[in-house]
Amino acid sequence: MKAVVIGGGVVGCSVVYHLARAGWTDIMLIERSELTSGSSWHAAGGFHTLNGDPNVAKLQAYTVQLYKELEEISGQSCSLHLTGGVMLADSPERMDFLRLAHAKGRYLGMDTELITPSEAKKMFPLMDEKHFVGAMWDPVEGHLDPSGTTHAYAKAAKKLGAEIVLRNPVKELTQDPDGTWNVVTEQGTVRAEHVVNCGGLWAREVGRMVGVELPVLAMEHMYLLTEPMPEVEAFNKETGREMIGVLDFKGEIYTRQERNGILLGTYEKACKPWSPVNTPWDFGHELLAPDLDRIAPSLEIGFQHFPGIANAGIKQVINGPFTFAPDGNPLVGPVQGLTNFWVACGVMAGFSQGGGVGLALSNWMVNGDPGFDVWGMDVARWGEWASLRYTNAKVRENYSRRFSIRFPNEELPAARPAQTTPLYDTMVANNAVMGDSWGLETPLWFAPKGTEPKDIVSFHRSNDFEHIGNEVRATRDRVGVTEIANFAKYEVSGPASEDFLNRLMTNRMPKNGRIVLTPMLNEFGRLIGDFTIAKTGDDTFMIWGSSAAQKYHMRWFEQHLPKDGSVRIHRFDQTLVGLSIAGPKSQALLAKLVDEDVSSKAFRFMDFREMAVGGAPCMVNRITYTGDLGYEIWMAPAYQRLVYKAIKDAGEEFGIVDFGMRALLSMRLEKNFPTWFRELRPIYGPFEGSMERFIKLEKNDFIGREAAAREHAEGPKLRRVSFYVDAQDADVMGDEPIWAKVGAKDFGTIEKPHGYGAPRFDETGKEVRGSDAATGASAVRGIVDGDWRVVGWVTSGGYAHYVEKSMAQGYVPAALAENEAEGLFEIEILGHRRPARINVEPPFDPSGDKMRG
Ligand SMILES: Cc1cc2nc3c(=O)[nH]c(=O)nc-3n(C[C@H](O)[C@H](O)[C@H](O)COP(=O)(O)OP(=O)(O)OC[C@H]3O[C@@H](n4cnc5c(N)ncnc54)[C@H](O)[C@@H]3O)c2cc1C
């Protein structure tokens, strides 16, 4: 067999369908019982396209569009009801959140619309509008029949040649030395090249068959169905339409019409995990006992907000389990450390996401690449620290916050601290506000003595603003020290290590004792990494990269290691920690800590050296992400306190300060430096990412060279640029639309809206089709507004404290990338379009003289 898919829920059926559609026919889905025997059969069947991660949102939009095709191929109805839906805001903060979601949707081609509560009431008369300040309409929402849809995937897959085997539990998985999997089932053993775990409620157990503890946990979830309601029937009769879906953040409630009544579900605060350690194998088409007390607080609010529902009788309460990953997004992709073992699990919204998950995974298996930016769903985004207990705490937090606002400066507390460095207590004693960086506690900023080290969460500039500014100014004017233990660190060694890295990386490898910066590409010439590499010995290299991408990158490195053992790769994780010093006095400071010449002549910019710092054996890079004169100093954890104390003691005479990750990110902005996973992602080419300095097309045949050469020859379509933004009290956070005054010129980079508009009504309540009347709440609609057009999106930004400018980075059509004209761009921050101007040269140290020293 080419592949065996384990599990016949909506996700497994979608995966097997997509594999068949991609041309694999020798494939089999094996289901322990009947199709939908996990959580799929009792789902509420709702679907929508909105997601906090725009890349996941795109895959959700694909899922919804797929159902028609599926019905045609399978001949099986999915009972699709595309009703549209509204999200109701009860507070100004929630309205800001909706404005953000609405703005994000622009460049995805989503036709959401901000509307008033009374407009929402016209679409959903059961609500009392006095509880709300505004709403957002999303035309691509609705519901379907979960069982019909799952069967439609399976039937379509069968038609395309896949085999579906029912009532046959997979008991064991073993792998032969040649990599072939033995899928041991009750009915015998199937040999397969690839195995996919779509075990849903049992995904953990299937993972354990190959020694992997997947971070998934099932939660109990309840929804209720009312008796038929005369109000619903009357609405249907009068308007000829079904009632829309409604999401009420305050009540943590979603509702929609079900037959002649209403379905109402909650994401209650007092949530409850189900089978937290082992899922029983004998759990079948069963429901759990309802517990209305648990959801009573939500229902109480819901009945105030929707008095029409309060008076209806409850016909049935459904309580069923379904699974979540710690952040609520799916776990998809190949598992690092194993060959040809894939997962598609933790899918909490199988009917919104199942199609996209199937498409991405099948692309990945068949073509070696998911074809989209699936980082938000990649199983590699979790490290070893995402244990059973971590997952339990985080999933409960995520579930109970499902409808809560997550502010851009908000650090969530559950399961923390997970990992700490030896300096953790010192940093806390220094009044650090700590944040989570891939499971590691990392200082974000330092509160002065007498000030509480706590973030006031907000979409606007907050209480950290002044203090981050002070950290930046003190560092740029004197010297600062920060912890950088959260960076990823690897050592590559062995006789073929240089060849290996030359094959993987776009830049030439450095000489002994030197450092290079280099992107990494996939075969399609898309950016999949960005590293600092030092040659530390004849056959050894140190690599530093993004902390969050450690498993993602290890998976790629391992896939490309020569089979003959001529290259070894080691990920240090927290067995190597670091400190960085930066600022004009950092060289004088380092000189006090070492016994050798560290003048700019002897220890040049981009040099690497091993030396004792404060008496501790360290590796030192003459480079920092601040873009200032500075150093990264790496040591075993046992020495970190010694080195830190030495730095602080010796730095006293220079007025040294501690600075945190937020100051570091502010400083990189004024150097126009990109960040991995924001500016640099697998949807961009290296020239689009403005990384040309690090792409050496002529050096050798590195992975992605051909595609990169093509991009270079044809010219990139987009370019990463940096902006000054005339912001008020809120800076960009990422994903804001970039508008340009380009008249009728269409750069073709923005997808078109779906073409559904919010239904509008005249005074008598009759729907007015095709009306485009702008309400007060929806002054700006669509992606074209007079001479203005959305031409791109922000990747990240914030306030650049030293140069005192609000800055943003993002992608725009290449033809606009060097146009520094005033009045050409606007960036939409929290629903307000603010003037913006491209800055080609970084505002801080554009010549690099300070950095070189
Ligand atoms: C009350 C409730 C309401 C919901 N409402 C919605 C909603 O409105 N919209 C939405 O999108 N989602 C909703 N969901 C979530 C949705 O049900 C899930 O996202 C979806 O069912 C996940 O599908 P799956 O295929 O991953 O898992 P499952 O449905 O659990 O399927 C896994 C399958 O794998 C099989 N299996 C496991 N181990 C083995 C083995 N060893 N051998 C063979 N077979 C095996 C199981 O028998 C099962 O059939 C709801 C869930 C609940 C409980």
Image (tube, grey):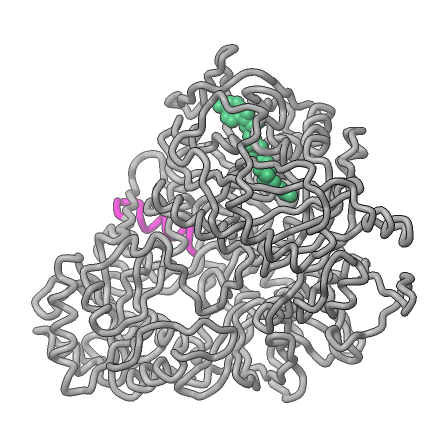
Task: Name the quadrant containing residue 260.
Answer: top right
Q: Position of residue 810 (x, y in %)?
A: 56, 71
**Range drawn in magenta:** 493-506
Is 702 colored magenta in this rendering? no
State the quadrant of the N terminus.
top right
- Residue at point 79%, 75% (across, down): 775
Task: Name the quadrant containing residue 639.
Answer: bottom left
Left or right: residue 312 compared with residue 273: right
Depth check, front residue: 483 or 572:
483
Q: Position of residue 706 (x, y in %)?
A: 55, 52
Q: Is residue 177 above or below residue 712?
A: above
- Residue at point 64%, 66% (across, down): 89
Left or right: residue 187 compared with residue 612: right
- Residue at point 10%, 64% (across, down): 616
Q: Position of residue 829 (x, y in %)?
A: 60, 76
Q: Position of residue 257 (x, y in %)?
A: 75, 46
Decide if residue 287 is in sight here: yes
Looking at the rendering, the quadrant in which ligand 1 lies is top right
Decide if residue 719 is in sight here: no
Depth check, front residue: 536 or 630:
630
